[in-house]
Image (tube, rainbow, N blue to C red):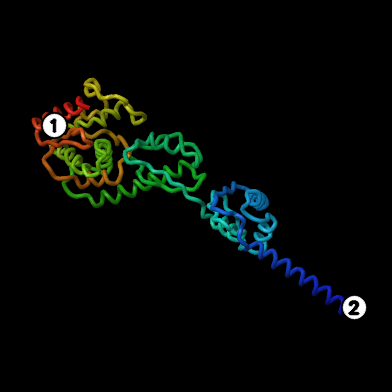
């Protein structure tokens, strides 16, 4: 073979390779066929081949081969990370690889409402199919901070519990450092206990500080708190709803949580209080109120004297009978 023929063949081969490479890169960066946003889950341990086939079969990319070639030659070296991803419409193979290497998985949310017991929170997590792992031990009551938490599909339930507990610990530390002088509460744990009672007593945000003020006044006077939610907790232990009205026998029944019988706070919280109830206890409304009862309209009627309180109770019973 002459030298000129050899050069010609080399030129043809190189030209062919360049055209092939350019074509592959064009297909690698070309808009994908998906006409709308979608989600896809990359299972842990999946190979590049399995992922590319899944993408092609799902109609997300044009070619599994181009995806694999792009992964090897046209992308930064890095593992494709398992998880659930939101894929934008028309996403190219290059954009998909960048997404899967970034690990920016789709986030889901779960809202832990204020006043849920730890047993209820545990069931909330157990019933969320996007979470993984088991929960066998009920967290300590009052150790979880109610709020909205974001997580990726497959995240363990125990890791979410850990985040809730860490959030509550940080809040407790911050709140106790800024507490005012003169509160009849000797630790942040007592603040959380009382806040859990406030949380269960009223669902109205503008009443929390006033309800907290009543209990603070009672503690200062060494009066029993006489809180119905604590009696209920002593019966159910936070595992279920009572499903009926409290009876006189319930109020007489001796449990560590029956604040009609004990002269102190219960031994631990009766629920997981939220930030606003905790702050209501730290900054209670100043008044001389010692009593409150439902007013029949979603709120409470407050009173300074037992005589006035009895009138409020009579009014509430009358409204209740009318309804």
- Binning the other alpha carbons within 10 Å of mark 1 as few (below 14), some (14 to 19) or many (20 upward) gives many
Which of pointers 2 and 1 lies earlier in the amino acid sequence? Answer: 2
**Is the residue 240 above or below the residue 69 in the image?**
above
Instruction: From the viewer's side, name the closer residue of 214 and 93.
Output: 93
**Residue 171 percent location from the top left of the image:** 31, 49
Image quadrant occupied by the N terminus: bottom right
Q: CA distance from mark 2 to mark 1?
A: 113 Å
Residue 250 visible, this orientation: yes
**Residue 124 percent location from the top left of the image:** 42, 37
What residue sits 20% from the left and 41% below the top?
212
What residue sits 65% from the left and 49% below the top?
57
Q: Are marks 2 and 1 in contact (CB under 8 Å)?
A: no
Classify residue 189 as left or right of residue 61. left
Residue occupying the far right of the picture: 1
Q: Quadrant of residue 35?
A: bottom right
- Binning the other alpha carbons within 10 Å of mark 2 as few (below 14), some (14 to 19) or many (20 upward) gives few
Residue 253 visible, this orientation: no
Instruction: From the viewer's side, name the closer residue of 318 and 55.
Output: 318
Residue occupying the far top of the picture: 249
| Residue indicated by mark 1 | 312
**Is the residue 59 above or below the residue 214 in the image?**
below
For label 2, the SS is loop
**Residue 24 percent location from the top left of the image:** 69, 63
| Residue indicated by mark 2 | 2
Image quadrant occupied by the C terminus: top left
**Residue 63 percent location from the top left of the image:** 68, 56
What residue sits 19% from the left and 50% below the top?
180
């Amino acid at each position: 073979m002459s030298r000129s023929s050899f050069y010609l063949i080399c030129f043809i081969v190189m030209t062919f390779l360049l055209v092939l490479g350019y074509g592959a890169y064009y297909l690698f960066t070309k808009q994908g066929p998906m006409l709308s946003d979608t989600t896809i889950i990359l299972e842990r341990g999946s190979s590049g081949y399995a992922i590319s086939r899944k993408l092609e079969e799902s109609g997300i990319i044009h070619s599994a081969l181009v995806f694999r070639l792009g992964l090897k030659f046209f992308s930064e070296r890095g593992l494709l990370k398992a998880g659930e991803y939101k894929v934008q419409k028309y996403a190219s193979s290059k954009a998909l690889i960048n997404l899967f290497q970034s690990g920016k998985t789709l986030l889901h949310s779960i809202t832990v409402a204020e006043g849920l017991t730890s047993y209820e929170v545990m069931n909330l997590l157990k019933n969320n199919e996007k979470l993984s792992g088991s929960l066998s031990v009920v967290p300590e009551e009052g150790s979880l901070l109610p709020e909205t938490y974001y997580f990726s599909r497959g995240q363990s339930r125990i890791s979410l519990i850990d985040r809730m507990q860490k959030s509550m610990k940080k809040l407790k530390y911050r709140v106790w450092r800024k507490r005012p002088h003169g509160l009849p509460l000797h630790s942040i744990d007592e603040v959380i206990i009382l806040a859990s009672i406030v949380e269960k007593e009223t669902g109205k945000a503008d009443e929390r500080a006033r309800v907290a003020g009543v209990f603070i006044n009672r503690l200062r006077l060494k009066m029993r708190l006489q809180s119905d939610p604590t009696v209920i907790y002593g019966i159910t232990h936070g595992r279920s709803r009572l499903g009926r009205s409290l009876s006189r026998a319930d109020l007489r029944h001796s449990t560590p949580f029956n604040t009609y019988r004990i002269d102190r706070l219960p031994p631990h919280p009766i629920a997981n209080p939220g930030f606003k109830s905790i702050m209501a206890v730290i900054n209670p409304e100043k008044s001389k109120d010692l009593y409150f009862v439902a007013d029949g309209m979603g709120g409470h009627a407050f009173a300074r004297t037992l005589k006035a309180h009895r009138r409020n109770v009579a009014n509430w019973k009358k409204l209740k009978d009318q309804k």
